[in-house]
Amino acid sequence: MHCLIEQINGNKRFYCSVVYASNNDTRRKLLWNDLCTFNGIVNDRPWIIIGDFNVSLHPEDRDSGPSIVTSPMHDFRDCVNSIEVDDINQSGFFYTWNQKPHATGSSKGVLKKIDRAMGNQGLISHFPRVSAEFQPYGLSDHTPIVVTIPNMAKRKVKPFRFSNHLADKKEFLPLVEDVWKTKVPGYHMFSVVIKLKMIKNR
């Protein structure tokens, strides 16, 4: 389900896609195609995608089993790379789905990360402190996801502009290197945005 969410005062708006992917690998490809199509509508505007993707993105997204990238994982990765989204900053439970052991004792149960909250560069730029909390399991075998988007200042953010002559100054590369070594907790996209802002201030 795709929707456009707008603040009451009309200052900020973003696209939100809520996902409940099929258990069937082939039918899931229809979702990947739909997300790629919708990305053409979103362009560079803020976009968050949340929900149950029913497939892991990385081998370490499960607590046991072989460390391989399966064909359905490849399909999911291709979609994520194509629409250029990444996990937003998160807290709480890492494994979001809990398959409880069978009563026969034939299975010890499985923990997987198949629920995600992802955003594009537009989301991180407009809402740099956006975060997702994966809460404890309740009645469901999935963890609830609570996304928080703190209020932003009403001032218009100026774009990052770069003048080529700055690169000729001897202080330029050491300054960039110094900023890039700074540890910024969170996901890669968030870290890059914060470091670019730090460079802009310098």
Image: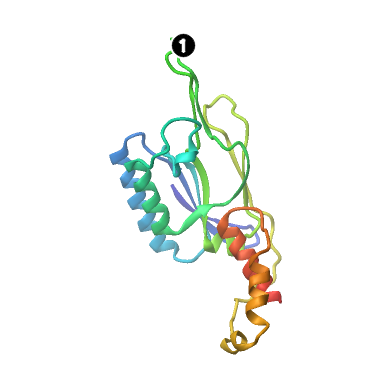
x and y, in percent, of residue 147 in the image: 61, 46
Give the residue pinned by disc 1.
103
Q: Callout 1: helix, strand or loop?
A: loop
x and y, in percent, of residue 168 in the image: 60, 88
Which one is in front, 50 or 59? 59
Vertical placement of residue 179 versus 128, above or below: below
- Badge 1: few (under 14), some or many (20 or more) residues near its Cα, within 10 Å? few
Would residue 60 be seen by someone viewing this image from the given angle? yes
For image coordinates 51% across by 32% down, the residue present is: 63
For image coordinates 38% across by 52% down, the residue present is: 79
Would residue 11 be seen by someone viewing this image from the given angle? no
Which one is in front, 39 or 200? 200
Marker count (numbered) = 1
Q: Name the side, left or right, on which 13 lies relative to 106.
A: right
x and y, in percent, of residue 141 in the image: 52, 27
Which one is in front, 60 or 12? 60
For image coordinates 59% across by 26% down, the residue present is: 138
Q: Quadrant of the C terminus?
A: bottom right
